[in-house]
Amino acid sequence: MADRLNGSVSLDALPYRELLEGDPDRGVVLFDTDMQMAYANPVARSQLHTSDGALLAGLKGAVSAFRDRLERSDLAVPPGEILLATESGRPLRATLAPLLRSGTRWFVVRVAAPGCFADPNVRRLQTRFRLTPREAEVAADVSRGLTNAEIATHLGITEKTVKNALMTVFVKCEVRNRVELALKAHDAPVG
């Protein structure tokens, strides 16, 4: 099924088609190096059409800054995570990653749908351990080695909320501490 946005590029003609079709709960937008949107899946289109254009402008700005960082660096730049302002006041999370195919650079942006999160690790933890979305975010951040203060800043919540979520996560994941949680989150043997 060829999906077109603004009559521009057919999904069949795009690189990394499997990445673009991916998770149906997440908005996926593909930009070229000129910051032209080549593709947006139905979730992304609905998110972009419900905003006043600020969301698209924010995406373009973030991708442009990411592209510039790539061009200035001799090193590989890891995929980035960004927060985008919305009319509701609750930021949307997005991850962006560069793709290179046939000498052309593309940028894939995955925007989380309300109640979902851009990081696939969060979703995996949520499903595997029956965590709430917030608990899964906290668990993912702990598994990346963040402190409670860093997690609170990252998620826009208080440290007390982080501590409360962490106690519940320990019980649900059947672990006693952060190290065991990190090991379990990465499928390493605990004990």
Image (tube, grey):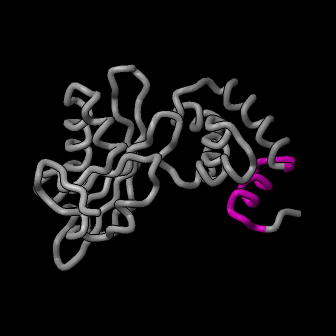
Q: Is residue 154 left or right of residue 58?
A: right
In the image, residue 39 lies in the stretch drawn in magenta: no
Which quadrant does the N terminus fall into? bottom left
Counting from the top left corner in percent of width and height, residue 185 is at: 70, 57
Q: Residue at x 24, y 49 (%)?
A: 63
Q: Residue at x 21, y 42 (%)?
A: 61
Q: Which residue is drawn at 44% across and 42% down?
A: 112
Magenta span: 174-188
Quadrant position of residue 50: top left
Residue 72, above or below 27: below
Residue depicted at x 58% and y 31%:
152
In percent of width and height, residue 121 lies at: 58, 54
Given the current orientation, which residue lies at the most extreme top position?
Answer: 88
117 sits to left or right of 105: right
Q: In this view, does 159 lie above or below 37?
A: above
Q: In which quarter of the image is the C terminus?
A: bottom right
Where is residue 9? Give x, y as percent: 15, 60
